[in-house]
Image (cartoon, helix red, strand yellow):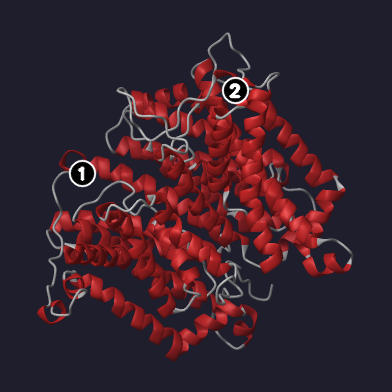
Amino acid sequence: MKTSKLTSSGPRSWSDLVPLQVLVPILSTVVALGIGLLIIAATGGSVTEAIEAFWDGMAGSDYNIGASLNRAISLGLVGLGFIFANRANLTNVGGEGQLAIGGMIATAVALHGAGSLPFGLAFLVPLAAGAIAGGVWGGLAGFLKAKRGTNEVISTLLLSFIALPIVYWSVESFHLLRKPITDLSSLPESPEIPDPTKLPLLFPDNGSPLHIGLLLAVLAVVVVWLVLKHSTLGLRLKAVGLNETASRRAGLRTSFYIILAMVVSGGLGGLGGAIMILGQQFYLTSDFSSGYGFDGLVVGLLSRGSAVGVVIGALLFGFLRSGSINMEITAHVPSAVVLICQGLIVIFIAGSAIFTNRKANR
Amino acid sequence: MIDEQMAVFIGSGLRLAVPIIFAATGEMLSERAGVLNLSLDGMMLMSAFAAALASWVTGSPLIGVLVGVLVATSVAAVQAFLSVTLRANQLVVGIGFNILALGATTFLYREIFGPLSRDPIPGFAQLNLPWLASIPVIGPALSNQTGLAYVSIIMVVVTWLLLKYTSFGLAVRAVGEDPRAADKAGINVARTRYLGVLYAGALAGLGGAFMSVADSNTFTENMTKGAGYLAITAVIFGGWNPWYTLGACLLFGFATALQFLVPALQLDVPVALLLLLPYLLALIAIAGLVGKSRQPAALTLPFERGG
């Protein structure tokens, strides 16, 4: 529309004071949650009870707040990975697989040797191994893109569906990560990782499960923000993304930057997976990453390339997930209602991008 | 003994392939027009549920299929509005719909079927065509299928004819390769893409309905288990060609069925490796390591007139 160009030089309207980029996500969330409440009411559930249980699950106690934040950490890391690759105009939809592979390798390293390392290396080494594994998984797609021109949307999606059966295989096979069958349990899962490899808690005294993964995630947010907004590397990634041919002519090694962007992107996802295992789950199951990668992808997509946006989205989805689990347990409202809300939030925000982009681009 | 196992294997391979054939064939046409429906899995799941519900209420599996197709096509209409008219990111919208479909079907299933979930729903009978059954080895497997399974092959033929010999097919291909040029040539890009997405929705609906009404006679939570993604993978592996896509779907169906055959034959092959086989094959194909597979040039790119 031409009108937006005209108004930009004219007097500021109310929508300039509350930018659409902020308004739309908030409205989308409110409307989606409202629909969720209507569904609960329409099917004869107690709305007040559901809200209470939901709130309690999200933030009702130190434990619940910690658990919600822990969820947000991994979602945020996948989201950060997404915006990092996206700076080079690459769309990494393979967060689910990078998370899964990172978690699996971190478990393997934690179980086989890392437990006896000193000075916190016991958990740092498995974290690093998970990040590297995720980086390799993402880098594979970057390599195919740079060397063979393979569309990274498709290759990262396929790599996700290749990663999930590999994790399943690793917990199904006794010669890989599966724990020996005992009288008590024969579930296909890994043994519990040794105590020294578990991430130290930030507040060990108040029962909160919040662990130092939070500090790592905050660090990652700052680093990604600095690199993307205020570094030569960020500029080069952007240049490669905008025009690969021109960048190559200008002397940039474009394949290097494409592969690097995907390695870092996948590495952040792998770190997210490693943190899930070392921080709260402590043993590997075949579906430990179930949905987190896709939720993290959505967090990244909705953030519009902003690290701050990733933080907000990760918190929203992390708290929603925690609330929904408690709502199902105590108020007997199926957590599927929250899935409906999440889906609606995503669709609303994506659908309104045409209006908010227009504002941003003028 | 081995013959019997082979017959079971071929039969289950075909049954597993049918919903993917439906969904992949429709998706192939939509992608040729430039729209990728990551929501395919959600469409199938919605249809599987709607078909099960309608069949259970009316006692007619045929009405079940019709309702399933209607529901999936409605989802496709919203997807088309978002990704064509509003030019929303096709991947985000698709993932949003998949989350929504999983939530909605799981919730409604528990609300409606909850206590009755053990009841089988009315489904189609197998046709048992005698002239097909007389073919050695594969005959019994081919004839022990419901009518809907044969419809999937008919849809492949229809889609192939549509793409290759009609003006609509020409428009689809033009719009998927170079929408700007197509627009200049007088083709209505938005209309063509809408029709492509609706077509994908209708066929995904048939695939989803097949799962609940024709194959298992029941609905279970998340019963598609990623079949929609497998269909998208088959389109890639099939190089956006209807016949190769059909071949890919059959291959994936049999690869999935192998997980039942391998333990029966007491072979020591990890089931997980069979599960990842289709995706690995597709990755190898798309990486150009074997053969040549090129996607439509304008795939996932929105089009704005005069922009």
The residue tagged with tag 1: helix, strand or loop? helix
Whether discs 1 and 2 lie on one chain: the answer is: no
Which of the labelled discs sits on residue A115, or is there none? 2
Relative placement, left or right, of B123 versus A1 is left
Residue B19 point in image, percent of width and height: 32, 65
In percent of the image, x 54 and y 47: which residue is there? Answer: A97
Q: Element under label 2?
A: helix
Quarter of the figure that contains the C terminus of chain A? bottom right
- The residue closer to the viewer here, B74 or B169, is B169
Q: Farthest right residue?
A: A250
Q: Nearer the viewer, mark 1 or mark 2?
A: 2
- Image coords of residue A269 (percent x, y): 61, 42
The amino acid type, in three-letter code, at marker 1 is Phe
Q: Image quadrant of residue B59?
A: bottom left
Residue type highlighted by circle 2:
Gly
> In the image as oriented, which residue stretches furthest toward the top?
A205
The answer to whether residue B243 is left or right of residue A244 is: left
The residue carrying pointer 2 sits among few (fewer than 14), some (14 to 19) or many (20 or more) residues within 10 Å by Cα, namely many
Disc 1 to disc 2, how far (Cα)?
49 Å
**Which x, y percent locates residue B144?**
16, 69
Mark 1 lies on residue: B113
